[in-house]
Amino acid sequence: METDKIEQIASRINWDKSPLIPAIAQDAKTKKVLMLAYMDKVALKLTLSTKIAHYFSRSKQRIWKKGETSGNIQKVEDIFIDCDDDTILLMIEQVGGVACHTGRESCFFTKLDTEEIISDIKEDATANYSVTDKLYHTLQERKHSNPKTSYTASLYEKGENAILKKVVEEAGEFCFAVKDQDTDAIIYEAADLAYHTLVALSYSNIDPDRVKNELKKRFGKSGIEEKNSRKT
């Protein structure tokens, strides 16, 4: 699609209300609603130009192509706009048949009133995810678990102070392990520290991808330069 045409279509959206608009993905054949995500203007233009669904991740704070890690991309067959010009509906072909990161066909598989799961996992959609990403998704899901049976859920229930207390505690144990030059203990305590740090990030709804991107920015920049840039 030509650039001018893409610009014309994108301008049809009422961006005055918000820089992000809801984008509903629906299977073009079965008509089943698969997921809800958000798009900014750039994501919409990428979707229009490539015919592959691109969204803006509010947790990662960046553009992401659906299926960029799992391979379960969404081929866009048609796009509809609602009567208020601020929500779009994508009619798509779901490659792999799995739209949800849990490995289910649709993201809508839990009944609100009974919490009954009405859809089975079709595949391990996280097979290509890093350990960090897998763990973060698991931690997010634990927010809805029973605190009596889930350690992580119990931390969420206790709140911010309990979560941060564990981070400080694990950081101290890691430091003592390093001071003792106990390799096994260093690895074990580092894993504990990483886990509880991710719990704190999850509690704050900050995807670890944003931390990775911050680290990437620092490549080629000295530590002194980085510290000075923060002061200014």
Image: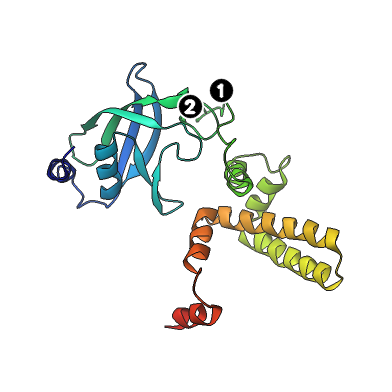
Q: Position of residue 117 (x, y in %)?
A: 56, 25
Count of marks placed on residues = 2
Q: Position of residue 7 (x, y in %)?
A: 16, 46
Q: Position of residue 58 (x, y in %)?
A: 41, 50
Instruction: Please give the name of the residue rendered at 35% of the width and 41% of the height, measured from the top-left corner.
Output: 54
Disc number placed over residue 139 in the picture, else none: none
Within 10 angstroms of label 1, few (less than 14), some, or many (20 or more) residues? few
Q: Are marks 1 and 2 in contact (CB under 8 Å)?
A: yes
Can you name the residue that lies furthest to the front here? 220
29 sits left or right of 71 in the view: left
56 sits left or right of 145 in the view: left
Within 10 angstroms of label 2, few (less than 14), some, or many (20 or more) residues? many
Which of 157/178 is in front?
Answer: 178
Gap between marks 1 and 2 measured at Cα:
7 Å
Residue 191 versus residue 37 in the image, above or below = below
Residue 163 versus residue 131 in the image, above or below = below
Q: Kindly tell me whether residue 207 is visible in this rendering.
A: no
From the image, tell me which residue sits under label 1: 122
**Quadrant in the picture for the C terminus:** bottom left
24 sits left or right of 188 in the view: left
Which quadrant of the structure image shows residue 150? top right
Q: Earlier in the sequence, mark 1 or mark 2?
A: 2
- Amino acid type at image mark 2: Val
Instruction: Please give the name of the residue rendered at 64% of the width and 46% of the height, measured from the top-left corner.
Output: 131
61 sits left or right of 13 in the view: right
Which quadrant of the structure image shows residue 48? top left
Instruction: Please give the name of the residue rendered at 46% of the width and 23% of the height, measured from the top-left corner.
Output: 97
From the image, tell me which residue sits under label 2: 98
Q: Kindly tell me whether residue 183 is visible in this rendering.
A: yes
- Amino acid type at image mark 1: Lys
